[in-house]
Image (cartoon, rainbow, N blue to C red):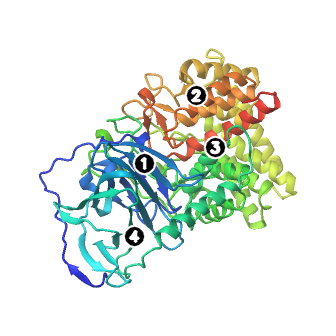
Amino acid sequence: MPSHPTSGDRADRPSQHARSAPHGSTLIRDYAVIGDMKTCALVSRGGSVDWLCLPRFDSPSSFTALLGTPQHGRWLIGPVEEARSTRRYVGDTFVLETTHETDSGVVRVTDVMPTADDRADIVRTVEGVKGIVRMRHEWVVRFSYGKITPWVSRHHGPGGPDDKVITAVAGPDMLVLRGTRLPHAHDGKHVDEFDVAEGDRLVFSTTWAPSHLPIREQLDSEAIVETTREEWQEWADRFEYEGAYRDVLVRSLLVLRLLTHSDTGGIVAAPTTSLPEDVGGTRNWDYRFCWLRDASLTLEALMGSGFVDETKLWRRWLIRAVAGDPQDMQIMYAVDGRPVMGEETLDHFEGYLGSRPVRIGNDARTHLQLDIYGELMDSVYLYDKYGRAIGYDAWINVVRLIDWVCDHWREKDESIWEVRGGRREFLYSRVMCWVAIDRALRLANRRSLPAPFSRWYETRDTVYRDIFERFWDPVRRGFVQHPGASTFDAAALLMPLVRFVSPTDPRWIATLRGIEQELVSDSLVYRYRLGDAFSDGLTGQEGTFSMCSFWYVECLSRMGDLPKARFFFEKMLGYANHLGLYGEELGPRAQHLGNFPQAFTHLALISAAYDLDRRLSAAGHTG
């Protein structure tokens, strides 16, 4: 329990009659992300930490203004006056530097989450650059997704009388605020205003700890910021690629590392929940979990970029998560490999820009998505090729898994898009079943491993013929979404990328032209079109899927249309936010939609950049 209490500074609960309004002051694209490879915080341009789950990506949030109002928790340190604010990451790191310029002066705020193994902190440093700037400090803690108002007290920390702290405690959680000057309780929050003159330096930190433990020691803020900066930069400096797109590749690889839990190896799809695919609509999902699909593709991206050692931890996570009968394998897991809980709606939130419901958990956990076996086997194949040779026990598990795929590849499923309108025989799932068997055969042949070769070869070839015979529509002149459909699906863009079909095969080129006509809008790609011909079981519309747009670029590159591929790729780079981050989708006026930042988008960017740069270089193109 906290020690040396000096006052019972109880924060008042918000009025039960206060109406929750959409928190629309900051758009998704205007957020920065910082993190410690265990969790992430979203920081607005104005200096407000509006989203933070502690101590883990999938823990309940302590600051949740992103989905509600400031009364649902935030940590603001920003100028009182209107300011012109610019931001950057310091080098190839997640040390965030924001410069606020007002009519009276300039102030710089540096935000960092130290990557220390046994702590969970945010350190915020305020420095006066020019003149005098009036700053506002608000610390509003609401545990358990904004539902629980903690008991807030002032104390002396373990450093003695000079170590003054404010603690917020509720149930198992404790947040500890330290600072050059501490705010005071007022109207359900802790607030302060102060002037920062040129040369001034103020340091603030918030630390999470289990509430039953003593208050943690104070950090050496200057040393920990520099150490964290060095750790990120040293990791990025190991990236040996020197091509035309190095800067965007480094940032995307850093995002993947940021979303990988440094202890368990679990890779989350995104660090947020319920940021909408359709503003004001219901397409709001919790992505703070480890999809086998996303994690497998992340492993491939890291290995392909030379970060082989980083994949070992993920491989161990995978072995733990999928141990057991293949039929019990789920499409997603919690960060530590446990099953994901079912969906729950948080009705006390209005949602981002009025987008309800706000959900935690994910009912897609019960889906059958046959494509995951293909992505999983592709990553196992590549890890064996570029990492460490597969062992006997792992190979026995592969054999069991592929035998299961051979028995079940004809089944209907929900597939990659996790539709809620009923199972179908989706093209993409069928292709990835072929990939699963094909990669297992390649692995067995290269390592001379025992396998039921005749059965596997026969099934693989049967799947191949089935796709060409039942999914090819001679009227639409393309591979359609499922047998009998009249619609195309952007997931088909992966067919040449996984080497199922040649990128110059006439049938594939015809399919690509159909996708361009139906799904491409000014270089941006929808994953499918909703209407009478296809329903995903949900209401509303959605934006273009950024990962599909990068897949489209890579398809153009592989088929040899390099000028078009390059133009569209560099156009997509222009849709990143000011820090090089992407959400899941783009809406009207390039509005970022969906959870943020999105691993899958950065994965597709990495793959497209490598292929395009390699082919441009081979063709003699220069920047």
Q: Earlier in the sequence, mark 3 or mark 1?
A: 1
Marks 3 and 1 sit apart, C-alpha to C-alpha, by 22 Å
Q: Secondary structure at mark 1?
A: strand
Q: Earlier in the sequence, mark 4 or mark 2?
A: 4
The structure residue drawn at horizontal position 75% and vertical position 50%, both measured from the top left corner, is 240
Query: Callout 2: 10 Å neighbours few (<14), some, many (20+)?
Result: few
Q: Secondary structure at mark 2?
A: helix
Residue type (three-letter) at the residue carrying disc 4: Trp
Q: Which residue is mark 4?
A: 208
Q: Position of residue 106 (x, y in %)?
A: 38, 49
Marks 1 and 2 sit apart, C-alpha to C-alpha, by 28 Å
- Where residue 177 sits, quadrant-wise, is bottom left
Q: Which residue is mark 1?
A: 99
- The answer to whether residue 581 of the structure is visible from this angle is yes
Disc 4 versus disc 1: nearer the observer: 1
CB of mark 3 within 8 Å of CB of mark 1? no
Q: Nearer the viewer, residue 484 or 493?
A: 493
